[in-house]
Image: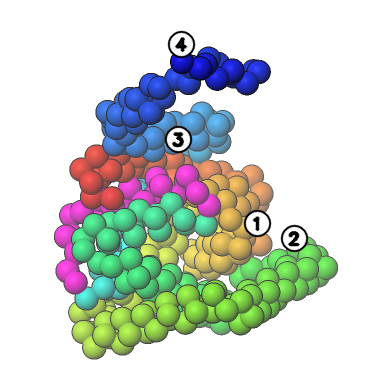
């Protein structure tokens, strides 16, 4: 008889020989799952969760619109739609290649819904990078185009804010609302954060190498784009029109609710509020933008109740109304492999 080796204690007499077969079966099952269909439904599910979580806020915004002037509300809806057109022009201005216009507009509409999944515009940025890489642009150039868009949009927004502050220096009275200690802490925090960012880039060699390579690509693309007048006009014209249209939408809602604040002061309040709210990362600006807009309108001379009603109605038109259609469009873009 052949010798039989004793089995160590605690181990089975026979090793299961079908484990690799079971693993292969599991991988085959995962491959058969409709992952793209699941990804198509994911934006709608997340947006539905957001709607349920903020249903009281949505209801308050909708109730404010029942007593408002419908023509001014339609104007606010129109400026919101034109804002996506302006963003489409600005995005086209960041690349030399011609992007498909309809898909580009649909991507900007869907990016608004994606912006509610992640804070600080990360969702919209991810959608746009996926769209540009799907159009054939390398990832480095897609990232450079995104950075150029943010630079142009921030430059025009801050430029508009500075111009309005020079024209209406007494429009915002923040003294009673924000004590000097709070404003000093905000400024100090911004300086410390900027210093830490610069030090990190300068001292960490891998980070410095990535940043230098990225800046070279971005500068080369920016020089090439500004040699094309059509691209430069699309970039800077769209970047200027977008905050103007957003501010005009708030002005239209304020007129619809008969807010007793001058339209120029409302525009100044909007630009100041969005500049401050950009420091506080939150999905879709929910919470940070709302609070900043109320504070800015009160600083411009509006009563607290009227300012709150105006902000709720404005956010209902610009955020909650297009949210579910945007999620549906985003799901369609994912299913058709555009993003």
Please tell me whether the stretch drawn in magenta is mainly helix, strand or loop. helix
Is residue 294 visible to us here? no
Count numbered badges in the picture.
Answer: 4
SS under mark 2: loop
Mark 3 or 2, nearer chain start: 3
Q: Name the residue under label 4.
A: 1
Q: Vertical placement of 274 versus 43: above or below?
A: below
Task: Read off the magenta span.
Answer: 97-119
Frontmost residue, 312 versus 146: 146
Mark 3 or 1, nearer chain start: 3
SS under mark 3: helix
Q: Does the magenta stretch include residue 201?
A: no
Q: Vertical placement of 174 versus 121: above or below?
A: below
| Whole-number angstrom distance, CA of label 1 to CA of label 2 | 8 Å
| Whole-number angstrom distance, CA of label 3 to CA of label 2 | 36 Å
SS under mark 1: helix
Q: Does the magenta stretch include residue 100?
A: yes
Q: Mark 2 points at which residue?
A: 177
SS under mark 4: loop
Mark 2 or 4, nearer chain start: 4
**Direction top: furthest residue:** 1
Residue displayed at 34% across by 60% down: 129
Residue 239: where, in percent of width, then height? 36, 71
Viewer-nearest of labels 2 and 4?
Answer: 4
Mark 3 near mark 2, Cβ–Cβ under 8 Å?
A: no
Q: Mark 3 points at which residue?
A: 46
For residue 295, the mark is 1
Mark 1 near mark 2, Cβ–Cβ under 8 Å?
A: yes
Frontmost residue, 149 versus 308: 149
Viewer-nearest of labels 4 and 1?
Answer: 4
């Amino acid at each position: 008889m052949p010798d039989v080796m004793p089995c160590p204690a605690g181990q089975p007499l026979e090793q299961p020989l079908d484990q690799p077969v079971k693993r292969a079966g599991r991988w085959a099952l995962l491959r058969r799952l409709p992952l793209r269909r699941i990804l198509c439904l994911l934006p709608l599910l997340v947006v539905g969760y957001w709607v349920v979580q903020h249903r009281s806020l949505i209801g308050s915004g909708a109730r404010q619109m029942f007593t408002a002037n419908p023509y001014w509300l339609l104007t606010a809806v129109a400026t919101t739609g034109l804002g996506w057109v302006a963003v489409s022009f600005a995005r086209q201005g960041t690349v030399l290649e011609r992007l498909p216009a309809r898909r580009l507009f649909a991507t900007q509409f869907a990016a608004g819904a994606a912006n509610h999944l992640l804070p600080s515009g990360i969702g919209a940025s991810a959608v746009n990078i996926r769209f540009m890489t799907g159009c054939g642009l390398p990832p480095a150039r897609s990232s450079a185009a995104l950075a150029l868009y943010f630079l142009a949009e921030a430059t025009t927004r801050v430029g508009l804010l500075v111009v309005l502050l020079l024209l209406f220096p007494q429009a915002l009275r923040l003294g009673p609302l924000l004590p000097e200690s709070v404003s000093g802490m905000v400024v100090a925090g911004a300086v410390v954060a900027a210093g830490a960012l610069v030090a990190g880039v300068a001292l960490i060699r891998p980070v410095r190498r990535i940043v230098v390579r990225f800046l070279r690509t971005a500068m080369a693309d920016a020089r090439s784009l500004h040699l094309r007048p059509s691209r430069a006009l699309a970039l800077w014209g769209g970047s200027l029109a977008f905050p103007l249209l957003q501010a005009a939408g708030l002005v239209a809602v304020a007129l619809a609710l008969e807010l007793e604040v001058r339209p120029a002061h409302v525009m100044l309040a909007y630009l100041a509020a969005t500049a401050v709210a950009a420091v506080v990362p939150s999905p879709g600006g929910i919470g940070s933008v709302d609070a900043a807009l109320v504070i800015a309108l009160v600083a411009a001379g509006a009563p607290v109740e009227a300012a709150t009603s105006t902000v709720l109605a404005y956010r209902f038109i610009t955020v909650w109304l297009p949210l579910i259609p945007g999620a549906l469009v985003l799901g369609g873009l994912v299913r058709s492999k555009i993003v």
